[in-house]
Image (cartoon, coloured by chain):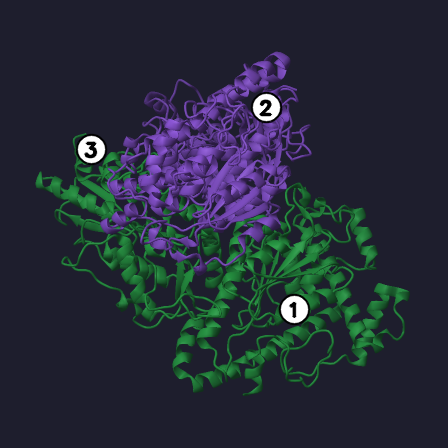
Chain colours: A green, B purple
Amino acid sequence: MTISSLLFHCPTPFFPYKPTYNPFPNRFPTTCNLKTNIHLSNDYKLSWTYELKKAYGSQLSEHTSDNDDFFQDLIDRRGVDNVRMLIIDSVQHAKAGHPGMALGMAEVGYFLYRHAMRYNPKNPKWFNRDRFVLSAGHGCLLQYVCLHLAGFESVQIEDLKRLCKVGSRTPGHPENVVTAGAEVTTGPLGQGVANAVGLALAEAHLAARFNKPDAVIINHRIYCIMGDGCAMEGISNEAASLAAHWKLNKLILIYDDNHNTIDGDTSLSFSEDISARLKALGWNTITVEDIHLDMGSFQSALLSAYGETEKPTFIKVKTLIGKLSKKEGTSKAHHGTFDDDDVKQMRAKVNWEDREPFHVIPMIYRETQFQAELGESLEDWTSTLRKYQSNYPREYEEFKILIDGGLPLGWENSLPRWSKSDPLDATRGYSEKCLNRLVDVLPGLIGGSADLASSNKVYLNGHDDFKQPKSPYGRNIRYGVREHAMAGISNGIALHGSGLIPFAATFLTFSDYMKNAMRLSALSHAGVIYILTHDSIGLGEDGPTHQPVEHLAGLRAIPRLLVFRPADGSEVAGAYKVAVRNRHMPTVIALSRQKVAAHLDGTSADSVAKGGYIVSENSERELPEIILIGTGSELCLCEGSAERLRREGRRVRVVSLVCWRIFDMQQEDYKEHVLPRSVPKRVSVEAGSPHGWKEYVGMDGVVHGVEDFGASGAYLDTFKMFGFTEENVTRIAKSLLEK
Amino acid sequence: MTISSLLFHCPTPFFPYKPTYNPFPNRFPTTCNLKTNIHLSNDYKLSWTYELKKAYGSQLSEHTSDNDDFFQDLIDRRGVDNVRMLIIDSVQHAKAGHPGMALGMAEVGYFLYRHAMRYNPKNPKWFNRDRFVLSAGHGCLLQYVCLHLAGFESVQIEDLKRLCKVGSRTPGHPENVVTAGAEVTTGPLGQGVANAVGLALAEAHLAARFNKPDAVIINHRIYCIMGDGCAMEGISNEAASLAAHWKLNKLILIYDDNHNTIDGDTSLSFSEDISARLKALGWNTITVEDIHLDMGSFQSALLSAYGETEKPTFIKVKTLIGKLSKKEGTSKAHHGTFDDDDVKQMRAKVNWEDREPFHVIPMIYRETQFQAELGESLEDWTSTLRKYQSNYPREYEEFKILIDGGLPLGWENSLPRWSKSDPLDATRGYSEKCLNRLVDVLPGLIGGSADLASSNKVYLNGHDDFKQPKSPYGRNIRYGVREHAMAGISNGIALHGSGLIPFAATFLTFSDYMKNAMRLSALSHAGVIYILTHDSIGLGEDGPTHQPVEHLAGLRAIPRLLVFRPADGSEVAGAYKVAVRNRHMPTVIALSRQKVAAHLDGTSADSVAKGGYIVSENSERELPEIILIGTGSELCLCEGSAERLRREGRRVRVVSLVCWRIFDMQQEDYKEHVLPRSVPKRVSVEAGSPHGWKEYVGMDGVVHGVEDFGASGAYLDTFKMFGFTEENVTRIAKSLLEK
């Protein structure tokens, strides 16, 4: 075994190899052989001594610097002061923002970036970095300030000065697509916890699939800060339950127990014993009593977490919201600026009076640079990777495809095709075939259902369930009945940046449960594939509570989300083609429970990529009198009605509008070709809310949809009740033609 | 103190008064003086003995009937057999349904309806009844069968035969608007738990407000059955956390621990210690080990619950899913029919071979009738109420208004009016004024926010926080950051049927978190008022995670939900007028964070009731050249742009489309009057998704909306970035005019 393999293979950072030089031996066990020897030179100490005297005055004895440990502690405290001052300056400058949590958690933030996390600011996307998630996203200033001090190019002092300004790199909540160093997009509470579980799942899965005894290429931790709000949200309990079930021991959840939410003291609405709850879920739980006095207790908590081989760790850190301010310890500190007097007092408390706003003690950059250098040295990883490449070329190839985010050549060819003679199925059945072909050619495909694998038909046959430590390589994820966590976790998997292609399945109706997380998929460019079956009243007996009506409309309105409702096997395959290709855009594939009526002649996988297209018409030479526009299971109804009308001598075009957003993005002439203005007689047929259909049908057309909740009944009875029969569609078309 | 006061005042049912005759003294402590003396007559015993011999054959000694207690136990067991047979017959007949949970929980269902719950089948809406909620709604057959046996008219054998048929009273999941005896609509998992917490909150609140030492008119329990799915859903954890925080001791949550979900054994995805979790939340927790062998243990658990004066009770009942079937104990029993052989064997197991499907042992009706009679006798309540009326006329009047579901005469007059000279405010500010006036005149108004009371401006000044035991009369509900539970609890409050008018507030964006519960408000006719502030990108700095875009579109598409986006104080008042009146339809009132630009001349509270109306135009005599249609904070933009255009000689109409659904419901001629076909040049201005606007703007009009996610920035900068300025709207209108 080589050193570097030991290094990464070691499940905890208690690294048996003694590094050549560790400047703070008792502070934190280093996990690697430092590339550059760092030591506290006398000059360096001297510079700090001046600064520390300024901070602590007479408390500082002349022998302080003799004790490296204590000296480092003082440096850290001063670092935390600096973090707080930058937070205050930023809020005052922006006249906006949320300083409360950022001030209270300054020690945690600083300690993580200074001593705990492994990252490389020069390469923020370094694959094996530790991931940091700020689930309490309103505390983004803490992250921005830490990123700045840690040397990330993405947050300069100028960026701090542009906090919450249009176009800045420091928006009001962390956005991964805006600020390098932010792994995910947070703000809606609890989401980050689920994201973190997804990141940890990705790590565990990939480690199990790729690591070799002599070449450990995947081994990192996920740190997540959550607040009281995150703790109250159901999604965090769902995600935490799964994290423990999956034994994600690399996950460290740090709870900012500041006893305040926007409305006041948490005693208003929160009296549970949260540590006991997490323990009941299966977590290792630790409490840090007063981090403001003793950062060492936080270090001990981390060490306990590192020692865990099965349980994820929950660290409850008691803090004072708005630490330093007059508003300290009260919900008034949650957001908003401070009055001048308060700012003055806060500066005085840390002996910062004479400094300009946005001052940074120059040595702080050197401090965080130690950690950054550690990160850079960890990029020795690349040498491990090279070894991996030569020893395990086959695995390396797969791994390379993954982390490059590419797709294997010709993967599309694996998608099944259907011919007239194939048995008819529900579109969810066609989807099952697609998924099970794709899993063989796409090494990144991984996912599951919220306890509806058999109904959604998303089980990857021949693959195991993801389950630590039994089968962490498994690519079927069993989410249980936890839709919201499923979507949040899927975002985490997608944003792990390791080429994993997560899919998440439930009934279309229950997309309601995970809507905010789906929105965040779109906002954070997470290419999650949502497989939503039972996509209309056509699901039958389960009745209106399970029958989606307004859901397609609601999902179609989410910016940057692609919503497909394919009509047959060809269109299902086409939807997967687009979904898999769009690694930075989430996709919904809405699928029927009930069998569809035909393999249509005019559908094709390739046409789906245009969003809408002509499925059939009497003749290409003549414009139709009427256009029937359908999606999903109702496209066959359109086709059947069209045939009836054609038998009566009518010129009818049938159009599949399988994905509105993509159709909208087509050139005007193509859209005009499919839906010519000169044909105002149009009928849309979709067993869902009419909302939005006028856009395609026009003011003279008829939108045939479902205007009310559905009804419990056999599929055909329900469809009949709401007028989804060939007879009725033909009747509607005729009366429009006769107008 | 009178007997009846003692009866209801007693916090537990250990009633000190010895009833004249209790047929089963050791079985269950009766809680009241039975009106009719019931005793097991010899004839009655004889009839049962015949039946029980059939069931248990030689196991039945000839002295069995000497021991009333044991005899009753055997009767109960036979009752449970009958419940199971009816479940099986119904599923086989319907060729659909979910028998698994219903069979496993037959003992619990039967015991509750036979021994525990207080209800009156002849008056299912009797105010002081115990409430039963089946959160695991797919087990509805259990409830239908119990309702039938208990004598509810709503479920006849014919109804069981029409399970899951279009138009039947026995849909695939319980619907309160379809089946009397179903208190709420369940199916989407976890919702029922939140509903039950809402029902318990209503009970606790009303009891505190109205009960008098000598006239206790409100005192009932809420029983809720939940399954593994409910346990996993985040909403149930949120709701359970609140139930304990609020000390809702009348709430009894019965967890069907059958270790199976659709996808298989719960070990696939669920390994937490759920009782420990509930304990951590603050619940009294009890486990019933084998109810299939010993129903008495369930009785003991209930007695423990009744003894609780502060904690709600969680009873974990270990059951076998699909009890009796070959599929017993496996997820295969979850849904679907049984093969003939299985049915045969199940019938044989309970000696039911020679009986027709849907057979009911005639004496069972007599059994449940005992309980029904108890319920009827409890309606002695009405005499207590009469006493209450004479002793507390003022309180009685208020109480009467509430339970009659009416509204006090002239309540609308309390709504504030605004004049030009009043200071301008955000529409959330106008809403605050409305709410605080309404609370004085509407005794039923009660509600709160998901930790954004100060931002949503929904605090009812001068009222206390609802908090047991400190201030259970309080009408401000502190939900903490738990949107989903908030909405589910609000549904429970609304469907308590006691005239309470719940409102629930959060940011519009976070309606995502509670969308399914909002949908259920509409489906179950729960008149919840959703106050959703920060209703566009105009909220500014918090950025895209907090800025709603697609939300109005998504909510507008929900059937039967009224979505208002008022533009100024008058329209806010108008929205409340409609919202309060619609006690069986939920309402959304979307409100701005930022100040709106004017008190508009043309708006009025009354016009809001039409959904859309003309706000201003050059002259009523001439048709306009162009119509600007706006909502909310953008109506002022329309008005400002219209004035600019008018100054240039253009004829411009401004229309407020404050509630699409209501406008759609107007007569055609009114709609034509507001938006005449002859004026095809129309511009809609709404800082939200364009989705759906074409309906009103037409194919020749321009929809000016937000097509992408928003951006963090000052309100005016963000608005400018997306083109929401008078200049830009005027420009758009002009280029349309020049077309």
Q: Are marks 3 and 1 in contact (CB under 8 Å)?
A: no
Which of discs 3 and 1 lies nearer the camera? The answer is 1
Which of discs 2 and 3 lies nearer the camera? The answer is 2
Q: Mark number for residue B438?
A: 2
Residue at (57% x, 71% y) in the render? A309
Marks 2, 3 in one chain: no
> Is residue A384 placed above or below B542 in the rendered structure?
below
Q: Residue under circle 3?
A: A736
Q: Closer to the camera, B158 or B469?
A: B158
How many other residues sit within 10 Å of disc 2, few (<14), some (14-19) or many (≥20)?
many
Q: Secondary structure under badge 2? A: helix
Q: Are marks 1 and 2 in contact (CB under 8 Å)?
A: no
Give the chain letter at badge 1. A
Whole-number angstrom distance, CA of label 2 to CA of label 3: 49 Å
Whole-number angstrom distance, CA of label 1 to CA of label 2: 55 Å
Which of discs 1 and 2 lies nearer the camera? The answer is 1
For the N terminus of chain A, the image quarter is bottom right
Q: Residue under circle 1?
A: A304
Q: Closer to the camera, A513 or A96?
A: A513
A502 horizontally vs A440: left or right: right
At label 2, the amino acid type is: Leu
- Whether residue A196 is visible to the viewer of this picture, yes or no, is yes
Q: Closer to the camera, B49 or B189?
A: B49
How many other residues sit within 10 Å of disc 1, few (<14), some (14-19) or many (≥20)?
some
Residue A576's x, y, as percent? 32, 60
Give the chain letter at badge 2. B
Residue A413's x, y, as percent? 26, 68
